[in-house]
Image: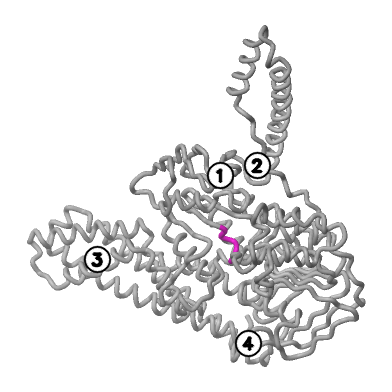
Amino acid sequence: MISINNLIIEFSGRFIFNDVSFNINKNDRIGLIGRNGSGKTTLLKIINGIEKPQSGIISKPNDLKIGYLPQEGITLSNKFLFDEVKSSLSELIYIEKQIKDITKELEKRNDYDSEDFFNLTQKLSEITHRYDVLGGYNIEGEIEKVLKGLGFTRDEFCRPSNEFSGGWQMRIELAKILLKRPDCILLDEPTNHLDIESIQWLEQYLKNYYGAVVIVSHDKTFLDNITNRTIEISMGKIYDMNLKYSDFIKAREEQKQQILNQYKAQQKEIEQIEQFIERFRYKATLASRVQSRIKQLEKKELIEIEEEDTSEIVVKFPEVPRSGALVVSVNKLSKSYGEKLILRNINFELNRGDRVAFVGKNGEGKTTFTKILARFEEFEGTIEYGMNVAIGYYSQNQADLLDSDDTVFDVIDKVATGEMRSKIRSLLGAFLFSGDTIYKKVKVLSGGEKSRLALARLLLEPVNFLLLDEPTNHLDMVAKKVLKNALMDFGGTLIIVSHDRDFLSGLTSKTYLFKDKSIKEYLGDISYFINTYCIDNLAQLNSDESTETLKSEEKVFAGKDKIAREEQKRLQREISAAKKRISKIEDEINSLEGEISNLEEDFANPEIINDFELMNSKVINYSQLKKQLEDKFHEWENLHNELERLKTITDY
């Protein structure tokens, strides 16, 4: 489907790609991996046509459709969310307008025996068939399904797109790509702005997708759950295997060991040849043999080995000061920004040594609560900290607190003590600072570089209560491993806000779900939480009754006022009646759609087309049925809105 041939890109004397070739086939699920800076994003841009290679050919059919989600740089209009997403379906919108215009034109005319009238009916038949093939009659339901799967609520469908935060705008762009159904989807770190539920929904969607998918991600679990092929970029070359990520890594380790053995054997051979040359260089009787050995060396294709593997770097926190048995106690905490309530009547307690994960959809208050615990936000309620609690806090904007005139090396040098002073360069290497980059000043670093540096510094600070907000967003696989290993040995109390399942696995022993301004405790790690909550919730998202079931889940959350028993019964009766009316309307909609479909088949029947009176009657009937269908959809939507309102009142 897409062929990359002899790709070459060189930058500052280093090959990003050195004569690289591979194909992307129709049903491939490719995980594109490699250290940060290896060229993954560049390769996606080249495939999409945004950038051009210095040399090489990218071959693809002219009609091939590619959907590309970048890491950043998304800009959206002020259209409502639903309209913004639908606006990406340009062909459907164009056909809808054509159908509407032709139908109106036919209703006004009575020249049934004219060639022009006949041509119009023919065109109407063709475009309605195309509209059906593209899924036009179900598109609004598909849009709603995708938006809900990515974490949007129905209430947000009429919110201007440009009012959403950057992370939510990335979700909007992702929804547009998925609904356009391109032949090949290119995703650059798609999970960075998704919560666990949305990630799981996206996994299911991509696994069943009919086209090719190429994913750049540092989320090991995400890659394992989707991909059937892995391509690693390393030192200008690629290593391509039909294996998911975990299996690929095992195979590559074996391959690297083989290459290392070959490298050692070759180096030994070269050393022996060089010794022969040096020893007999000036003996006339052996001149021909010496020249033969020199030519042998010149022709030898040298084996290259991988760069130093920093994944084995061991970083340990300094010995933590011992805190009291109770680290923090929160009582009836609430938080609002203006009139917007974020958290309500939160009760929460941590003891020394607790290791907790905060999960939930973006905007549910995880970051806000973490900032409150770190003493960066005001709140209502009470918080008591235990004796000798020393807080260490990391967030994306925490990097802005670094001294802008310090170099990268200075930042770590100021806090490194003991044996870590001899490992500063190794630590910086693990967090992707090497060579001359360690002498860059903080003020010239990118946002991602600052975040990595702030995180590296935090590993060396003597704290006993550590709060980390999305610490893995700017880290590759190696750096994440270094951080996780350090946290596994951390002797204090830990809170992590993260959606990275592999990173959290085995690292925490409690999980708190943030939802509907409240929190719920799960006494287990992320795997336990997924098995007890997310699997059921994912199934609900894919069912027609998802909203109803999700509302019943919410009954477990504290802090909700209960209405009187009799009032509850009355509202339940209204809910039941609304469901029955909705079911009846859905039957009527199905019936109308069947009649419309039959008429569209008639429009393709030459016998009917040539009977002008019959054709005119069917066109008029078609227009009336379309109007009835539109009215029924409007009635169905109003009933659904009413049902949602009733369910909200009853906490159903």
Q: Does the stretch in magenta take in 333? A: no
**Secondary structure beneath label 1:** strand
**Foreground label between 1 and 2:** 1
* Residue at numbered disc 3: 98
Q: Position of residue 647 (x, y in %)?
A: 58, 82
Separation of residues labelled 1 and 4 (CA atoms): 52 Å
For mark 1, what is the residue?
A: 14
Amino acid, disc 2 = Phe
Mark 2 to mark 3 CA distance (whole Å): 50 Å
Image quarter in which the C terminus is found:
bottom right
Write down the residue under mark 2: 248
| Horizontal and vertical percent position of residue 525 | 77, 63
Label 2 or label 4, whichever comes before in sequence order: 2
Determine which residue is flagged by label 4: 341
Q: Can residue 635 be seen in this view?
A: yes
Q: Mark 1 and mark 2: span between their CA atoms?
A: 26 Å
Q: Which of marks 1 and 4 is nearer the N terminus?
A: 1
Residue 204 lies in quadrant: bottom right
Residue 241 is situated, as x and y percent measured from the top left of the image, at 59, 38
Does 192 lie within the magenta span?
yes
Q: Which numbered disc flags the more N-terminal residue, 1 or 2?
A: 1
287 up-or-down from 88: above or below: above
Residue 15 is situated, as x and y percent measured from the top left of the image, at 54, 43
Closest to the observer: 241 or 448? 448
Camera-near label (2 vs 3) is 2
